[in-house]
Image (spheres, rainbow, N blue to C red):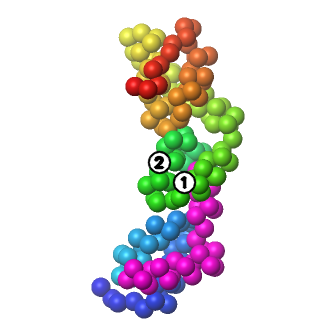
Amino acid sequence: MKQRNESELLRLAAAYCSSCERCISEVRKKLAAAGSSPEAAGRIISRLLEEKFVDESRFCRSFARDRFRFNGWGRIRIRYELKQKGVASHVIAEALDELDDETCRSALSEMLKTKKRTATGRSEYDVFLKLYRFARGRGFEGALISSCLKPLFSEVYEVDEDA
């Protein structure tokens, strides 16, 4: 592997950050793969932060908005994925606060209506549970799921959210 100096690594990292929003851990991994020492990576990341190539808050807002809109993820799943990337909890909380509750509710309702058309089960309760598990897997909160499922079923079912 070709040894690169710090200015080349800085240009590489700046180009990497210019293509789309990145978090610090992604940039650190990219620099490590390019052969950077941890000390040099720290200096490069500091410079990228100064010049606003990397901004964790901007990254979180973009990540949350995009994953909600395009992947249909809920707040729980988005929080988990951001924690996996090493983003601070307070930054994650700020980004998730920007997701509108009513928008989340309407998107989940539409998703569940669509899914109900194709869901099969021996009983209405089986379909209810399938839809509930589907929405939980997408990372939506239990109370939100229950409130969106109630209008879709003739009987009102309860789910033990601790289980």
Quick check: is 55 in the magenta stretch? yes
Q: Residue at x 47, y 54 (%)?
A: 83
Give residue 101's position: percent from left, percent from top: 67, 37
Q: Residue furthest left?
A: 1
Quarter of the rendering containing residue 160:
top left
Tell me the SS state at disc 2.
helix
Tell me the SS state at disc 1.
helix
Main SS of the magenta part reads helix
The answer to whether one can see residue 131 in this image is: yes
Give residue 23's position: percent from left, percent from top: 52, 65
Give residue 120's position: percent from left, percent from top: 41, 18
Quarter of the rendering containing residue 46:
bottom right
- Total marks shown come to 2
Q: Residue at x 58, y 44 (%)?
A: 68
The answer to whether one can see residue 113 in this image is: no
| Label number found at residue 111 | none
Is 86 drawn above or below residue 142 in the view shown?
Answer: below
Give residue 47's position: percent from left, percent from top: 57, 82
Is 33 drawn above or below residue 70 in the view shown?
Answer: below
Q: Neighbour class for label 1 at 10 Å: few (<14), some, many (≥20)? A: few
Residue at the disc numbered 2: 80
Direction from residue 34 to residue 149 in the image, left or right = right
Residue type at mark 1: give it.
Ser
Residue type at mark 2: give it.
Tyr
| Label number found at residue 89 | 1
Range shown magenta: 37-64
Quarter of the figure that contains the C terminus: top left
Whether residues under marks 2 and 1 lie with C-beta atoms below 8 angstroms apart, the answer is no
Q: Which callout, 2 or 1, points at the residue further toward the start of the chain?
A: 2
Quarter of the figure that contains the N terminus: bottom left
Q: Residue at x 59, y 55 (%)?
A: 90
User: For the residues carrying marks 2 and 1, which lies nearer the camera in this image?
Assistant: 1
